[in-house]
Every structure is written in C-alpha cells, then in structure tokens.
Image (cartoon, coloured by chain):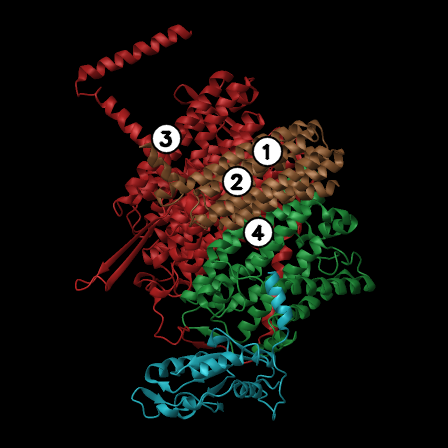
Chain colours: A green, B red, C cyan, D brown
Amino acid sequence: MSTLGVVVQVVLLIVVAPYLVGVMRQVRARLEGRAGAGAGQPWRDLRKLFRKEPMSPAGSSWVFVAAPAVLVASTLVIAAVSPFVATVSPLDGVADLFAVVALLLLGTVALALAGLDTGTAFGGMGASREMTVAALAEPTILLAGFALSARVGSTNLSAIVERGQQSPGAVLSPATLLAAVALAVVVVAEAGRLPVDNPSTHLELTMIHEAMVLEYAGRDLALVEFASALRLTVLLGLWANLFLPWGVATTASAPALLLGVVAFVAKVAVLGAVLAAGEVFMAKLRLFRVPELLAGSFLFGVLAVSSSFFLA
Amino acid sequence: MSIGWALVGVLVIAGLGALGAVATGSRGRALVAGVSTAGVGVFGVLAGVSALGGEAFSKTIPQLLPLSEVTVTVDALSGLFCALIGGVAVIAGLYNIGYSDGHGSRTGQSLLPLFVAAMILVPAAGNVTTFLVLWEVMALVSLMLVLAEHRLRPSVRDAGVWYAAMTHAGLVAILLGLVLFASKAGGESFTALRDADLSTTTRSVIFVLVFVGFGSKAGMVPLHVWLPRAHPEAPSPVSALMSAAMVKLGLYGVLRVGLDLLGGGPRWWWLLVLVAGGVSALFGVLQASVAVDLKRLLGYSTTENMGLILLGVGAGGMFAADGNRTLGSLLIAAGLLHALNHAGFKTLLFLGAGSVLRATGLRDLDRLGGLVSRMPATTALFGVGALAAAALPPGNGFVSEWLLLQGLIHGLPGADAVVAVAMPLAVGVVALTAGLGVATFVKAFGTGFLARPRSEEAAGAKESPRTMRFAMLVAAAVCAGLAISPASLGPALTRVLEALPTVRDGSPLEGGVTLRLTGIAGSISPVLILAGLFVAGLLVVVLVRRGLPRRESLVWGCGGTRLDPRMEYTATSFAEPLTRVFDDVLRPEHDVDVTHHAESQYLIESVRYRQRVDDRVEAALYPPVLAAGNKLGAVLSRLQNGSVHRYLALGLGGLIVVLVVVGLTA
Amino acid sequence: MRQLLKKIRSTGRVAEPAPERAGDGDVVLRGSVQVRHVDAGSCNGCEIEIGSAFGPVYDGERYGARLVASPRHADVLLVTGPVTRNMAEPLRKAYDATPAPKRVVAVGDCARDCGVFKGGYGVEGAVGDVIPVDVVVRGCPPEPPEIIEALRGLTGR
Amino acid sequence: MTQLLYLICGGLLLSSVMVLWRRELSAIVRLLVVQGVLLGALALVLAGRLDSVELVVVAIGVVALKAVLVPRILRRVLRDGNEARETEPLVNVTASIVAAAFLILLAYAASRPLVRLSPSAETQAVPVGLAMVLLGFFVLVTRRRALSQIVGFLLLDNGIAATAFLITGGVPGIVELAVSLDVLLVVLVLQVLTARLRTTFGGTDIDELRELHD
C-alpha cells in the first residue's frame, strides 16, 4: 500500500507540475490586464516539444545530451521520496533533508555542465551565475534545516512533517517562522524566480537559468522545461509541507491518500498564485545584490537555529 | 599474513625497488619503480587490513638507532592509516608506470618506493624516537620528490624551499612537543606516554605544540602555504601520494597524540581544532573556487577537505570532552570516513590532472577544454572524482559530509552557549564549503574538459596509455565502493575508535543497504539513491526515445560568424562572480592595459586584462616573518667571518653553556 | 506597491475579446507556437506592430504563441523586411538552427516581395528567396490582428 | 501579551538588520521611524503588563521624539545634502549581514546568564536590545556618511532604551534615563547640522576628517 502512495505521489507531481507553471503564468497575465493562455498551455508546449527534433551544437559531448535526463531523474527521485502526499514511504532511508538538497544540487550541476559544454559565452555565463547562486544558497538551506530538525531530533523529512502535524502550535514558534522566511528566499532563488532570476526574460545578459539552456531544442528542451516545472513544484511542495503540514497522509489508506492529494494540490496552487502575484510587484535584483539577499536569508537561518536553542 | 611480515615486506620491497630503479636504465626505470611502489602499497594494505580486523602487533628492536630502541606498534588506528596510504600507493605506483615512462629521473623514481614505505611506517611507530626519525625520513624523501622536476621549471625550486621550510618548522614543533612529553613522562614509548600523569598545563602545552606541527603537515591555514606550491610542482603520482596520503598523517598525529596518548583533554583544545578546521575549510575552498591552475586548485581543495576532517574531529573531541560519547564517536568516525573518501577521490583527481598535464603540458584551466572528445576515458574518470569531491550523491564524498552534518546538528539539544554558537556556525561553514566546492569542481570539469579546446596544446591532446587509465579506473572503483557501501566500514571504524579511550562507544554506524546511525535518529541509503537515479534516468530515456533523430548543428552565435573558442567562458570568467562576492576576503588584483593607436588616442588597438588572486593569508603573515628572519640572519652572519678560531670559540662557548645549564638543573 | 495595486484594480482586463477564427489551422504544432522574430532588414514598422501583437491589448499569448530568446526554442521564424546582403547568411543560419518541424512567417510587404526596397543595391531578395516561406502576412505594416491571425492559423486556437 | 512582546522585539531586530541591508538613506530613516514606533509600542506593552502610567507617558515621549522629531530633522539634513545613498561602506553589505548574524549570536550567548537569573518574558527578550546595541556600533564602525553615523548612534540609543525597558521595567528612573539619553541624541543631531558645514570637504565622508589632523 505504501508503494501505491509513492506511485500516486510521483504521477501526481508529474501531472501537476506543468499546470502549476500554467496557473502562475495565468495569474500574472490577469494582473497585467492580459487574457492569458490558460493553465494548460505548458502541457501543450511540452507535448509539441517532445515531438520536435533534438539538436546538439557542434563540439558538444555526451554531457550535453545526458544532462536533461539527469536533471529530470534527480528531481523524480525527490518527487518519489519526499512526503508530499503521504509520509509513509518504502524509500524512507532516502527521505533525508540533506539528501534531497544534494539531489537538487546534482540537477543544477548537470545543467551547468551542459551550459559549459555548449562552448558559448551565454552558456558559460549562465552556468557560472547559477553555480554562484546555488553555492551561496546552500548555507541557508542547511541552517534552516538545522532549525527544523532540532525540534524533531532528525533530518528525516517524514519525521519533521509528522511532528508538525502532531503539535500544530510549534509551527508558529519563532524558530519555525524564521526558518520559513529563510527557506522561502532560498526556494525563490533555487527555482529561478523573481527577484533572483526572471524566467521569462529575453535578454541574455540578465539571464541565469535561461542562459544555460539556450542551446537546447526539441525533446531535450522539453525535458529541461519539464524538470524546471517539476523542481518548482517540488520546492513549493516541500516548503508547504514543512511549514503547513496539514492534510499529508500518515497512513496509506485510500481516503487518506485522496485527502493528501487534494491538500497538496490546494497548497501548491495557492503558494504558486501568491508567488506569481508577488512577482508582479518586483523587479529583478542586480546580480551582485543577490548575495546580499542570500546573506539576509542566511541571517534568518542563524536566527532560526539560535532561537530554537535560546528561546527553547 | 601477520602484520610483522607485512611490514617486513614493505621494507624489503621498498629497498629492492629503490636499488632496482637506480640500476635500470631510463627505459625500464618507471616500470621497476611503479611496480615496487605498488608492491609496497599492497603490503601496507595487508598490514592495515589485518590490524583493522582486530590483530595487534608490537615489536621492539633494541639498539637499532643510536641511544634508543626502535618500537613498532600497530593497532587499529595505525592500521587505518597504513591501509589508506597503501591503497593510494598501489594506484599511484601503477599510474607511475605509464606516467614516468622514459623520462623519470633516477632520483625521483628510486625514491618513490622509499617514500611510500616511510609513510606506511610512520603510523606503525611505537615510540617517540622511531616516530620522529620516520617522520623526518618521510619529509626529506618527499622534499626530494617535489624537487624531481627542478631542471624543467624554475618554479619547482621556489616550491621546494617553501616546502622544506614549512615541513621543518612543523617538525620542530612536533619535536619540542613530543620531547617535552617524553621527558615529563619519564619514558619515550607510547605506552609510557599513555600512562604518564601530567599537569593540565603541561599537557596543554604539548597539545598546542604538536597540533601546530601536525597541522602544518595537514595543510591547515595559516600553515598551508607549502601545499598549493608543492603539490602542483611535484610529478603527478607524487602529488597524489602527498595530497591523498601524506597530509593524512597530520590527522593521524592529532588523533594519536591528542585523543590517545594525552587521553582527550579539556574542551578548548578541541574548540581550537574545530576553529582551525573551519577556517581551513572555508579559506581552502574559496581559494580553490577562484584558482585557474588545475593542480593548485586540487591542492587548495586538499586544505579544504583536511579542514572539514579536522572540523569533525574537533567537534567530536569537544563532545567527548563533555562526556557525550555517542556524538563524539560519530563525528570522529565521520572525519575518518571523510579521510578515506578524500584519499580515494583526490588520488583520482590528481592522476587525472597528471594525465591532462602529460597530454597537453598545461595546468592552466583557461587554456584547456575539449578533452572530452580527445581523452574520453580520462574525462569520465576525472568526472567521477569531481562528483565525489563536490560531495554530491551518488559520489562518496556525500556520505561523509552527511555524517558530519548529522553529528553537528544533533549536538544542539542539551548544549551550553559555546556549543550553541559553535554548532550553527560550523554547519554554516560546512554548507558554504560544500556549495563552493560544487562550484569549484563544476569549474574544473566544465572548463577543463568540456566544450571546445581553448589552445592548440589542448586541441592536440591524446588519450593516456593503458596503465594510467587502469590505475585511474582502480581509484574510481575504490571511490564507487566507498560510495555504495559505507556501512560495511562500520566494524573497522568501531575498532579504530576503540583505540581512542576517550571516545570509545560501541559502533557509530551500522546497516547494509541503508546506513543507520546508532544513538541518534538518522539514516541514509546511498544504494537506494543510486538505484533511484538509475531507474528514473532509464525511465526518462525510454519514454522520450521516440521521435525525430538528433541533428548536429553549428553553435548558435546569433547568426554571426562561427564562434571562436576564444569567446568561450574560461575558468577565470566562471569564477568571476564568486571573486566579486568575496572580494573583501580574496582581494583580487586587476590589471587593465589599454593600448591606443599611434594616430589617435580615441582608437584602441588592444586591451589586455589580467587578474591575479594571491593567497592573502600568506601575503599578510609571512613577509613580516621572513623579514624578521632575514634581519636575524644578517645579525648572525656577523658571527661568521670565516676565521676557524671564531668557530672553535663558538663551539667552546656552546659547550660551556650546556654544561652550566646541566650543572644548574641537575 | 499600493499604487500599483490600485492601478491593477482600476485597469482591469485590457485584452480585447478574441475574434472568431477563420478556417482550420496547421495541425503540426497544435496549440503551441514558440516564435523567434528575425529582423532581416526591416524599417522597424513591422516590429512595432509585432510588439503590440504581443502586448496586453491583442495578447498573442492567449492563442498559445510566445516569443522566445533563441531559434533553438522556436517553431516559427517571424521574418520582417527585405533580406539585406548582410542578413541573408544569418537568416539561413537561424533557419538551420530551428529544430524541425518548423514554419516561416514572412511579415509585411517587404518580406513578401521586397516592397519599396525592390532592386535596392543592398537587398538580396525577399524572404522566400532565401529560406522557404509557409505563411505570408501582407501589409505595410500589417496590423496586429493580421499577424495574430497568421499565428492562430499555426496554433490552431 | 507575551507573544506581542516577542513580536515587537522581533520587529526591532529585523528593522535593525534592515538598516544594514538598505543603501538609500531615506529608506533607512523610514526604518528608524518604524523602530521608534516599535519602541513606543514596547513601552506601552510593558505599561500594560506592569500597570504603570509612567510608562505610558514614556511611550508617548519615545514615539514623539524617535518616530516624529528626529526623523524630521534627519530628513531635512538629507534634503539639504546631496548624498542619497550610502555608496561604499567600509564592509560590503553581504559581509555586514553575515557579521550581523554573528553579532546577534554573540548577544544571545552573552546575555544567557542574565536570562537565567530571572527567566521572565522580558528578560528573554533582552538579547534583542543587546544585539541592537552591537549592530549600532557596527554601523558606526563601518559606514562612511555622516548621516549613517547618526543612524548608528540612534540604533545604539534605541538598543539601550529597549534593554532598559526590558530590564528595569517600571522603575521611575527609566524616565530620567530616557531623557538623559535623548539629550545626548539632540547633541548628536546638532552635530549633523554642523556636518553641513563640512560640505567644504565636498562631502560628508568622515574619513575626510582625517585631514583636519594634519
């Protein structure tokens, strides 16, 4: 039964991820006074891209070809092991916060190497920037994880979520709130959203994530786009379940799983809409002010840890 | 085989190998030296594995050294390091066969087996004299190996001078510490030291002295300055041996003296180790992330990893001093596991860098590139090492960093203010180190091996000979083994911890497929992660295989002319954002030369941009010391005027002073 | 922020209601068209119209068409202007860099037959002389609804 | 009530850190307004907890002075000067924020004995006041513009006031203390006015004052 939970969860994430991007674009379009293409547009884009021919730039290697698959695979593993719909998983040993963070980083690295492998200036630029942001976001993630796990005594994601469900009051503790703010900044940075990166920019010089994938075409591009949608869903889902753990199934029964699915979709949709609406009010930060933002989130991480200790 | 015979084997093969390498001509020399080095390594591994299996060995040979006896004691702690060094030596020896084929110098090749033998015997030493003699032999032999290519590049000599000075300064500190220890303890065998009853002040003085000495060998900031110079300049098998094996002996010394012979000690010792480790890790990775010389990058990465190991050991010692043995043993086990992992991947990386150097003559990442199609095997193997060094799953570095973080995180409940401040900062340091480490190795692999070649040398690179590839494959296999089954090392690590009386506490980790920690909640499964990645990857490939075939097309250059390799991102440009973010720490020097046309100052003929990132710690700390040394030298040189009578008078004076001191203290 | 919110509320939706679409579309791309715009020597009149075709009022994106940053990501090349000598080769390269199946839309009279620039010394020819053209939008410059109509023919929405 | 107290202290800490992050001096002045209001709210909450009328008076005084009067003076200085931004602090913003993390940890660790002495809600929040003092000092040390210097002093002063409120609670002496500290403040504000005289140096970079030494 717990295997069923995993399958449900993975399929759900795969289906939902492009829709989440669609919803976010739609929210943005409405706020800008446009009609918007509808929430299903990313799926239409993907369907078309999967049918197009993939292309390799001359002089690139197997790294370029393999990177999208590695990116999707690493994200799928996270989708399978983390507690999005249910906390019961046969893959319990992998559902560790640090392992999930490292897997996310693995995907980033695969894409950065592909960006360098194309041999274009833009690819290298995107890779360099992406790695800088990822490196500087790392301390915040681990410190916020530290603050969350200090209460539970474990970095196992399911354990953290279950503890959150058992003592709802603790979610409002200063440590958790500070960690939530710190992780929110990091989620924005890792997902490549405003104000760190602009996902819909056309200007190469301001790109981070987009610059790395400029050379991808056809189904390679489909994989990359799908992976970035899946990563966004995974990040928002993790954030939601760490800080708003309600509705996550703790048993593998069908009604509990159903409730878990509904709760997950609702949480992610709301968070996505809030994020998209927030982006309307924001401009992209200069690249060299991004470290300041991340340093700020690091500060919140430190405060989260110290308040979990000093105010305990 | 018993440990004793294995150690005899080490000595015999090293001697035969050295003689053989001296005797053979330039054609077979690399083969003889390589095979005998590997043989010495095999015996080292045998000795180490039997010690880790629970066998103990102790032997005293009187009167082998003047005024002292030679004692050899091997316990599980020694065994771990013997096995580690032996393993690295097997791989480096095999690699040397191809690498030095036809151009290895007589001295360099014949000293290689001796160097390995000295390193294997250092942890087997059972008394102070034996230890110091072997330590000095190791230092001298490695110095000569560093200098092996001094005829080819003048920079080698500079590196040699730095290495000689630093390693001997370290030796003086260790010598002072251990001699003080032995004199206060009234005996020089390790057993006598262990049983000695000393005042806390004495013990602290001994610990600080010894820590400085071993710290310099471990490449700890600010005593690391020799490392990024000596490692790049040494021949690559020697770099691998030094970086993967020799620096670990610094760790051995800290563990042996601090936790075993001195038996733990107050908390501030270990806080010192923790802080030194943290600073080294951060500084090392920062320098590595902006380095453009591939071997220098790897050298700084060694400083970083030794820093992480010492951070773990320091935190472990701190918890052990507080009486929390569960965490103490976990953190020290994490440090030891990371030492093994680092030995594995750093060997692989230095050998990979050696292959690149041999094929192109370049260490400069800015001029490399395009090796993925020219040296596919080397590229793939270097990639395995880089993955491990970046501490990403499924590489082996990930597991030990995970253990380290688990230990640090679980220290918070029940802690006092010092721990409560130290642990979050330590986690922050480890995390930033991990993040920057990833950026560093993406740079090394991405700009060094991928894309198109940035110079003619790189464009003309040829794949290395089979023996070199085989040696690297062995190293990669070791890394893979460590990555997949770290839990199988559990019993061995438990035995090592048993040799350290203050942290002894059952086995810190167990499990098969899933690695579980004992005493605290935490589990991870490297096998499942690997399997999950594999299955998911396969799924993706199978699902999207349909459709139109792949087409190759020119790189999209916005419709302009063909993109020149000079337009590619280089390692310098890759590291530029990081250089900017950390410019307060790194203080890079920029140089922009603009040449104008002779006809008009408004037309520019060429622009030259240079950036240098020097080691700021070195620039800040060493010149004053060197200046003071020069001044002292100038004063002392007045004593020497060439007159024999003056020298005799000095000798007499010295003798009188010694006698007076003896007379007064007796 | 409050001001912006107020403005959003007072502006509301500015996109005009979608007109009826005439005829069936191309079935290859079905609902999603990524557009790379190539200016092959235009006077920038067409560019202004294309810009407003993707602005809030006409909102080309609602039909599944989206401007992208690289021909690698594109299905459709939106080419404007007579092809000048300097732009002929880049245009061919852009066409080559676009993955199949792909379509070319020539926007404006100049793109169709060089318009008033016909016979100019710097003009290589119409777009159709350089790369195969699938759809032509006439006008000097064509109005946004006409451009959108052409794109809707490709997206089928 | 305790939650409200913590919330206010959190706000104080956050606004102090934001002073390090923002570059526009006008935004920093706005943050000082926020801080003044929060400080007043703190006094008011404590007045409620301790049933003290005097603290209500103090609260009104604090808001009037710190949230209205001083910011007004600062804005005037800002308008007359031509420097709207702290362009090049001696320590860059990223490093400042990381340093702030360290200083806050230090404040928490250092005030632990005090908290343990009488573990009440007020003393639990004392580290916040101490942290503000440290951050104020940090601003003084690392920022170049004369106005930033004043901001540092004000931060320091707010920190002292917050600590005093939290520790001494309803002691009447608090009024005296607050007044005396604010006299100091007014003197400093006057110093800003004289800083305008220093426009002879072409700016208010206080490093330029070194020239007076020669």
Q: Secondary structure at mark 2?
A: helix
Query: Which numbered marker is on residue B168?
Result: 3
Q: Mark 1 vs mark 3: tell me if same chain.
A: no
Query: Which numbered marker is on residue C140?
Result: none
Residue depicted at 72% across the width and 39% down the height = D45
Looking at the image, tell me whether mark 4 or mark 3 is earlier in sequence order: 3
Q: Nearer the viewer, mark 1 or mark 3?
A: 1
Which chain does tag 1 point to?
Answer: D
Q: Is residue C94 above or below residue A101?
A: below
Q: Name the amino acid, label 2.
A: Ile
Split into 4 quadrants, where in the image is the N terminus of chain B? top right
Query: Which numbered marker is on residue B309?
Result: 2
Labels 1 and 3 touching (C-beta < 8 A): no
Residue B307 position within the rendered picture, expressed as x and y whole percent measured from the top left: 49, 40
Residue B413 visible? The answer is: no
Q: Name the amino acid, label 3.
A: His
**C-alpha distance separating marks 4 and 1:** 54 Å
Residue B607 position within the rendered picture, expressed as x and y whole percent measured from the top left: 27, 59
Q: Residues within 10 Å of mark 2 (few under 14, many from 20)?
A: many
Q: Secondary structure at mark 3?
A: helix
Q: Name the amino acid, label 1.
A: Ile
Residue B80 position within the rendered picture, expressed as x and y whole percent measured from the top left: 54, 38
Q: Nearer the viewer, mark 4 or mark 1?
A: 1
